Image (cartoon, rainbow, N blue to C red):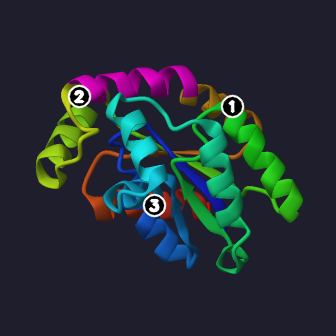
Amino acid sequence: MRMLIMGPPGAGKGTQGAKVAEEFGIPEISTGAIFRSNIANQTELGKIVKAIIDKGELVPDSLTVDLVADRLAQPDTAPGFLLDGFPRTVAQAEALEGILDKLGIKLDACLLLIVDGETLVARMMKRAAIEGRSDDNEETIRRRFEVYSAETEPLLALYRDKGLLVEVDGLGDVPVVHSRIVAALKA
């Protein structure tokens, strides 16, 4: 299974993405996790990315596309993969299509977690307190929602038109949401 997981910031993509990847026996490829690892290790990429995300902005396409292209060419992605955090823009979606064409593969699904805005803010504020993430303060959270709405939501129409969009209610306990996702993907 080759899929994307999408949804607004705080929708549970990381939590559910890991469980779905395990369920289907495929690697989860999280651009956010890769970026956070670079930040924690204070690499040159990490310093650049930290400055960008601390402002609530998205990492430029050129950095992200190269990272994803390299990762998708790795042997462990042959049986499939779950991309979390990519694509976020139409330009990235077009770049992904080019990457997949070169690899001779196609996407099977674009999973969308649906969660209301107030629940998302509460989740992200709680995550900020627990994890100490600098990108989870209220001002930055609101900015990330604006960026998501402007740049990422157009992708939903694109994947809906291709018949790949699988919408799942993201509210509820982790096991409940996971069972909804598996049922929807296997339908």
Q: Is residue 6 above or below residue 161?
A: below
Q: Amino acid at mark 1?
A: Val
Main secondary structure found in the magenta portion:
helix
Q: Secondary structure at mark 1?
A: helix
Crowding near the residue tagged with mark 2, few <14, some 14–19, many ≥20 C-alpha atoms within 10 Å: few
Q: Amino acid at mark 3?
A: Gly
**Which of pointers 2 and 3 lies earlier in the amino acid sequence?**
3
Residue 171: % across, % down: 30, 45
Quickly name the residue at label 1.
90
Q: Secondary structure at mark 2?
A: helix
Q: Is residue 25 above or below residue 64?
A: below
Q: Is residue 180 above or below residue 58?
A: below
Distance from Cα at disc 3 to Cα at disc 1: 21 Å
In the rendered structure, are the residues bearing label 3 and label 1 in contact, judged by CB atoms less than 8 Å apart?
no
Task: Tell me which segment is drawn in magenta.
Answer: 139-151
Quickly name the residue at label 2.
118
Is residue 98 something that shows in the picture? yes
Is residue 165 something that shows in the picture? no
Q: Residue at x 71, y 58 (%)?
A: 69
Q: Which mark is residue 17?
A: 3
Q: In the depicted view, which residue is nearer to us: 101 or 58? A: 58
Residue 167 forms part of the magenta stretch: no
Residue 63: % across, % down: 61, 45
Q: Which mark is residue 136?
A: none
